[in-house]
Amino acid sequence: MTDQPQQHGPGIRPLYLFLLVTGVCVLFVLNLALGSVDIPIEAILQILVGGEAGQESWHKIVVNIRLPRAVTAIIAGSALAVGGLQMQTLFRNPLAGPSVLGITAGASLGVAVVMLAAGTITSIFAIQQLSAMGSWLIVLAASLGSAAVLLLILLISIKVRDNVTLLIIGLMIGNVTIALVSIWQYFSRPEQIQDYLIWTFGSLGGVPLDQLWILAAVAVVGGGIALVLSKPLNGLLLGENYARSMGLSVASTRIWIIVSTSLLAGGITAFCGPIGFVGIAVPHLTRSLLGTNDHRVLIPSTLLMGAILLLACDIIAQVPGSTTTLPISAVTSLVGSPVVIWVIIQRKNLQASF
């Protein structure tokens, strides 16, 4: 595998960057404009710059409901996409995603403990009524669950040097947590199971403005670590032996990759619930469009592409003109699967990227 950052010529990257940033901005505005109540784009732009909208209700809808949802979509899409890119590079596996180490399953187990074991007072409906206090209960439970799995994986990674073995262990840990949740569901009341299933659908609308900064901070820390790891990630693509010969500490790099991905995947799952397929689909799409495996280019591009994909999926999920909101995780799978199929058909051999 050779690194090919200059394949398309020196002038193509700024153009791609401009197109990606433009795409994020356009979809961000559309996300604010479309929904059960269509709001003119002119009014949206007025609200964003601090002006007055044509109707007071428009201002409340945008600021209190749609703006936090759209910002959450940008943060979640970016974080999951970068997490998936790191996992695919670390394990050199095109099917690896942010949840491959069981971090997402650990978060789900934490939420299951609260929802299925603590009684109906902690059901999702009661939590919504409790506002910040209730949502913090779910966020804390998911964070503790993902942190516990992260600690276990880090301890194992110190002993296990082979990435494939670590991948299998991560998958097994994920299966164990899923099995525990299934057993818990079997002995739970139907209303508790329903509440938990609603959480597993994923949602971008449950993070209020006053909590967005925490979600953003976690994503910035995780993404910042990923950016610092750009060169080590390039080294891993050339093989661990070659990376060591270049002076790279493979063990240390692997730990930092796990920490970064865990922050990104665990943080998003804690605040938004499980959102699937973004982490698998976006890195492949970005590699296909840019024609490079240089992580100095891939990481910022994947970040923007993830935001674009989740913003587009959120527009679809809200079913413009209807009061219906589809589960975001279902929409990402419906959109992401054809994307991956298209990339496979175009590239014919995904493994060649690793």
Image (cartoon, rainbow, N blue to C red):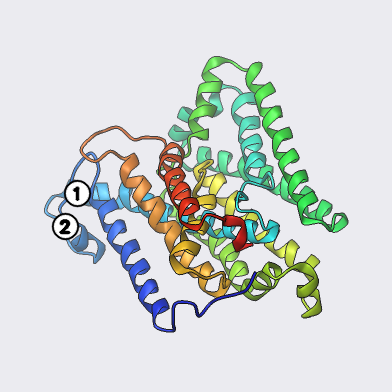
Q: Quadrant of the C terminus?
A: bottom right
Position in image of residue 109 (x %, y %):
66, 35
Q: How far apart are labels 1 and 2 at the CA level?
A: 8 Å
Extreme residue toward the bottom, this view? 10
Q: Is residue 75 left or right of residue 252?
A: left
Res. 115 image quadrant? top right
Q: Is residue 318 left or right of residue 121?
A: left
The residue pinned by badge 1 equals 58
Tell me which amino acid carries mark 2. Answer: Ala
Q: Is residue 148 visible?
A: no
Tell me which amino acid carries mark 1. Answer: Trp
Badge 1 local density, few (<14 within 10 Å), some, or many (20+)?
Answer: many
Which residue is pictured at 74% across the width and 33% down the height?
Answer: 176
The answer to whether the residue labelled 1 contacts the one labelled 2, judged by CB atoms less than 8 Å apart, is: yes
Q: Quadrant of the N terminus?
A: bottom right
> Which structural element holds mark 2?
helix
Extreme residue toward the right, this view? 159
Position in image of residue 136 (x %, y %):
55, 43
The residue pinned by badge 2 equals 43
> Which structural element holds mark 1?
helix
Q: Nearer the viewer, residue 155 or 12?
A: 12
Q: Relative to 205, say whether 249 is above or below.
A: below
Badge 2 local density, few (<14 within 10 Å), some, or many (20+)?
Answer: some
Q: Is residue 35 visible?
A: yes
Which residue is pictured at 56% across the width and 65% down the height?
Answer: 223
Q: Is residue 66 left or right of residue 130?
A: left
